[in-house]
Image (cartoon, helix red, strand yellow):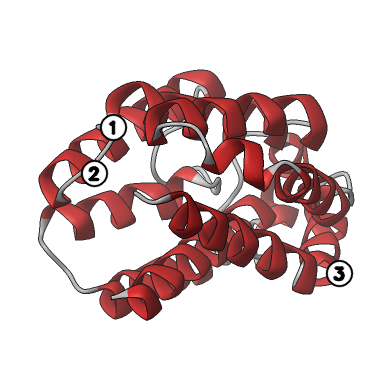
Amino acid sequence: MAAADLSRLIEAAANTIAAHAEELTGLDQAIGDGDHGLNMKRGFEAVRAEAGAFAAKPLPEALKAIGTKLVMTVGGASGPLFGTLFMALGKEISAAPDRANLAAAFGKAIEAVAARGKSQAGQKTMFDVLQPVHEALLQGKTAADIVNIADSAAEATVPMKALRGRASFLGDRSIGHMDAGARSTALLVRAVAEAIERRA
């Protein structure tokens, strides 16, 4: 991946999170700490600020560095989880990944997220978006299909009862609200997929 391409992906991700920061905060205020939008915006602005340095690295090293930056700057529960996603992806992906390598690397990355968060599907977390996105990658779905799958997966967290994170303390009161981490994950999937589509 060329440096300019990675810079565009970083820009797209940071722009998307910034544009939806208030929405993410509102979702988190309903069943969490109320700081998800602000935390995610801070983290991705920090990544954006060093986009040139990240883009100059080989893709695996760039992803690991981005993950480290997110752990250091996002804070809360989301920092380690999103940081783990990028760091684990960087460990598994090749410098010039094809579809098969991307799918395999993404699979290992979401396993790392699940282990870090002690989460699994159906517990109302970001994993509820990551897993179907991985399945879509394995099935060779188009970028548009993957975006729709991610959006639908985030929406599907609304009727779930939270079993992980701060929302789990609310029990049945967590039902009826979208998980903020699932929503931000879907937003990032959309930003990356659309940026890659525009390049193609």
Task: Judge depth for marks 3 and 2 and give the one in front.
Answer: 2
**Label 2 CA crowd tier, 10 Å (few <14, some 14–19, many 20+):** some
Q: Residue at x 34, y 49 (%)?
A: 1
Quadrant of residue 200 within the rendered picture:
bottom left
Residue 187 in the image, given as x and y percentages of width and height: 57, 66
Residues marked 1 and 2 touching at CB (< 8 Å): yes
User: Does the rendering let one see residue 119?
Assistant: yes
Mark earlier in primary sequence (3, 2):
3
Residue 117 in the image, given as x and y percentages of width and height: 55, 25
Identify the amino acid type marked 1. Answer: Ile
Frontmost residue, 162 versus 183: 183
Q: Mark 2 — residue?
A: 102
Residue 88 in the image, given as x and y percentages of width and height: 42, 25
- Total numbered labels: 3
Identify the amino acid type marked 2. Answer: Leu
- Secondary-structure class at tag 2: helix
**Label 1 CA crowd tier, 10 Å (few <14, some 14–19, many 20+):** many
Residue 62 in the image, given as x and y percentages of width and height: 50, 33
Q: Residue at x 17, y 69 (%)?
A: 141
Identify the amino acid type marked 3. Answer: Glu
Mark earlier in primary sequence (3, 1):
3
Q: Mark 3 — residue?
A: 22
Q: Mark 1 — residue?
A: 93
Mark earlier in primary sequence (1, 2):
1
